[in-house]
Image (tube, helix red, strand yellow):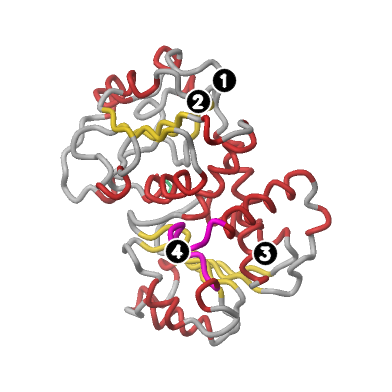
Amino acid sequence: MNPDTAHLLDIESRSDAFHRRVLDLAAELREDAVPWRQARAGRLLVNLFYEPSTRTRVSFEIAALRLGMRVVNIAAADSSVKKGETLMDTFNTLQAMSPDVVVVRHPDNGALAPLAEAAWPGVHLVNAGDGSRAHPTQALLDALTMRSHFERLDALRVVVAGDLHHSRVTRSGVALMKKLGVGEIRLCAPSGLEAGPRVSEGTRGFDSLDEALDGADVVMMLRIQHERLAGMAVPDGESYHRRWGLTTERLKRAAPGCIVMHPGPMNRGVEIASEVADGPQSVILEQVANGVLTRMAVIHTLLDD
Ligand code: ASP
């Protein structure tokens, strides 16, 4: 196994070829997943989650089950982490039981890097979100969703709006969109919640959602990451919605075929109005379905290396 390609820690550390291979396989799985049902039979995936999750954890589980794998779920709250065990000790304990894939979500940026160093041959790590740093499978499933609606990404105007500063979805999503050659990436955030300079490089910045939406083909709304604000003051839900919320009225400024995305969990009536979330342009549940396909493709591809 090539140690450089054994894991999926972030978008930046993997090649364009890897991302394209995953996206192509996910698209193939969408057409017909039946031939892949037992493709990884007998292999074992462990989900190790130190932060709450609905979509991501279940989606990795279903993806593995659909490939014929077995799955063990560990929530840190119910494990020896409660007794003071370190992440490394927990990971090493799991490694000793010979899993093929370990999926980790952790509140600390870069928490998986030392685990990747310590990983035994045959153990593949997948980042399911580390702090505000990276969420590579979300970026891939979002790209799959865009690709299924638009033939050419280089002609697209994509708006990413909300708390970009604390968002791992932004960081990984923008990195992948740049690699895939998305036409124009528009970043729109309230003051103090803007993306950092590395993410913003090569994008267009907006402080008005109305202006950012003009002629847009895709709009991705993100929630405020309250768990990462560390005491920072943000407007209350209603004021936020008035200025930064995606409403039907605002969406009229976008291109007629504009799709509305959100990685979830949504705060209805804050960053997105219910009528938009449940409206005809919303592809939010499609993103969830694509999440399973993308994670099947990621697991399958990593186990090939
Ligand atoms: N579910 C995504 C994540 O884990 C987005 C979010 O929580 O806002 O980063």
Q: Earlier in the sequence, mark 4 or mark 1?
A: 4
* Residue that carries the numbered disc 1 in the rendered image: 257
Task: Please state which amino acid type lies under the numbered disc 1.
Answer: Gly
Marks 1 and 2: CB-CB under 8 Å?
A: yes
Spatial separation of the CA atoms under disc 3 and disc 2: 31 Å
x then y, percent, for residue 202: 34, 41
Q: Please state which of residues 299 and 173 is positioned toward the viewer in this rendering.
A: 173
Marks 3 and 2: CB-CB under 8 Å?
A: no
Spatial separation of the CA atoms under disc 4 and disc 1: 33 Å
* Residue that carries the numbered disc 2 in the rendered image: 217
On whether residue 8 falls in the magenta region, the answer is yes
Task: Please state which amino acid type lies under the numbered disc 3.
Answer: His
| Circle 3 Cα neighbour tier, 10 Å, few/some/many (<14 / 14–19 / ≥20) | some
Residue at point 40%, 35% (across, down): 185
In the image, is residue 232 above or below residue 302? above
Spatial separation of the CA atoms under disc 2 and disc 4: 28 Å
Q: Earlier in the sequence, mark 3 or mark 2?
A: 2
Q: Earlier in the sequence, mark 1 or mark 2?
A: 2
Spatial separation of the CA atoms under disc 1 and disc 3: 33 Å
* Residue that carries the numbered disc 4 in the rendered image: 13
**Prevailing SS of the magenta stretch:** loop
